[in-house]
Image: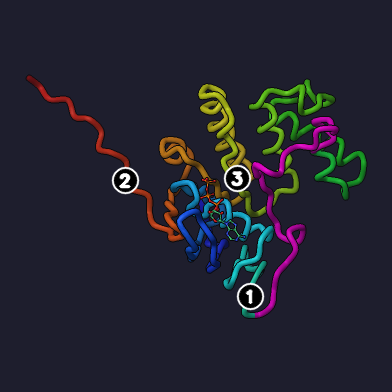
Amino acid sequence: MPTAAPLDVTLETRLSGPEGPFTLDVGLKAMAGEFLVLTGPSGAGKTTLLRLIAGLARPGRGRVAMAGQVWCDTARGIDLPVRARSLGFVFQDYALFPNMTAAGQIGFALHDLPRRARRDRVAELLDLAGLSGLATAFPAQLSGGQRQRLALVRALARQPKLLLLDEPLSALDPDTRARLQDQLRRLHDLFGATTLMTSHETAEARRLADRVLRLEAGRLGAAPPPPPSLRLVRV
Ligand SMILES: Nc1ncnc2c1ncn2[C@@H]1O[C@H](COP(=O)(O)OP(=O)(O)OP(=O)(O)O)[C@@H](O)[C@H]1O
């Protein structure tokens, strides 16, 4: 259950879209453990917002704070490097290392643990991902769903306070996607990270999220309510 309001984001930055420049101008707060899904049309700025929060891009101006720690504040010249921010991410352009086994991918994220603790933690995370029998498999030997489960537990390996997911399920077939939605929500609940995910699928957003937000042309609004359910009429 959400308990506090630790993610506090106010960002403004100029972007150039196909129809000309526009401003990504966002104020966003999330509770600890809250699962937010960000929907909106292509080009609205969803990926850019996640990259700015992660520290992979720098905003024109603004502030990002998480759990009382300021990650970025342009007015005070603060801009923590990505590795100093307690976050995990699954981004389309941060794929798995092709030449590393499943166990190696997770172990890499835990490189500073002593060897035995690292081995135990890797085994535990592989088990959580349902990949215990595939510890020595390389990404090319895994299905799309297995790869995304691996990417997810790798992102959660260091128990980050914030989990950023950019369309993590979009490349999967519908059945795998539905299964992974449930697994994703379970992992989120288990780790208790605040999660911000982007999705084009309104149904997916409603199924997963505690709160759905919509970004349009750089501005945030609440998502429209779900359509009223059909009422049966006696004839
Ligand atoms: N550093 C930048 N400077 C200027 N414009 C940028 C920069 N980064 C992204 N853009 C532009 O901002 C717009 C929003 O891109 P973004 O990828 O954030 O949208 P999106 O909502 O995630 O779209 P999609 O749903 O298709 O992934 C795009 O037109 C992109 O070209």
Q: 52 and 126: which one is in front?
A: 52
Badge 2 amino acid: Pro
Q: Which badge, 1 or 2, is on the more N-terminal residue?
A: 1
Q: Quadrant of the C terminus?
A: top left
User: Quarter-wise, where is residue 146 in the image?
Assistant: top right
Q: Which residues are magenta?
A: 76-105
What is the spatial separation of the Cα atoms under label 1 and label 3, in whole angstroms?
Answer: 24 Å
- Residue at mark 2: 225
Query: Which disc number belongs to residue 32?
Result: none
Query: Can the viewer see residue 26?
Result: no
* Image side of residue 170 versus residue 215, left or right: right
> What residue is rendered at 84% in x and 25% in y?
136
Find out if the beta carbon at label 2 lies less than 8 Å from the nearest ligand 1 atom.
Answer: no
Q: 169 and 114: which one is in front?
A: 169
- Residue at mark 1: 74
* Image side of residue 35 versus residue 192, left or right: left
Q: Which badge, 1 or 3, is on the more N-terminal residue?
A: 1
Q: Position of residue 27 (x, y in %)?
A: 48, 65
Secondary structure of residue under mark 2: loop
Badge 1 amino acid: Thr
Badge 3 amino acid: Leu
Please rate how many residues cluster around mark 1, counting C-alpha atoms within 10 Å: few if below 14, some from 14 to 19, many from 20. some
> What residue is rendered at 51% in x and 53% in y?
2
Secondary structure of residue under mark 1: helix
Q: Nearer the viewer, mark 1 or mark 2?
A: 1
> What residue is rendered at 54% in x and 62% in y?
15
Q: 86 and 11: which one is in front?
A: 11
190 is within the stretch colored magenta: no
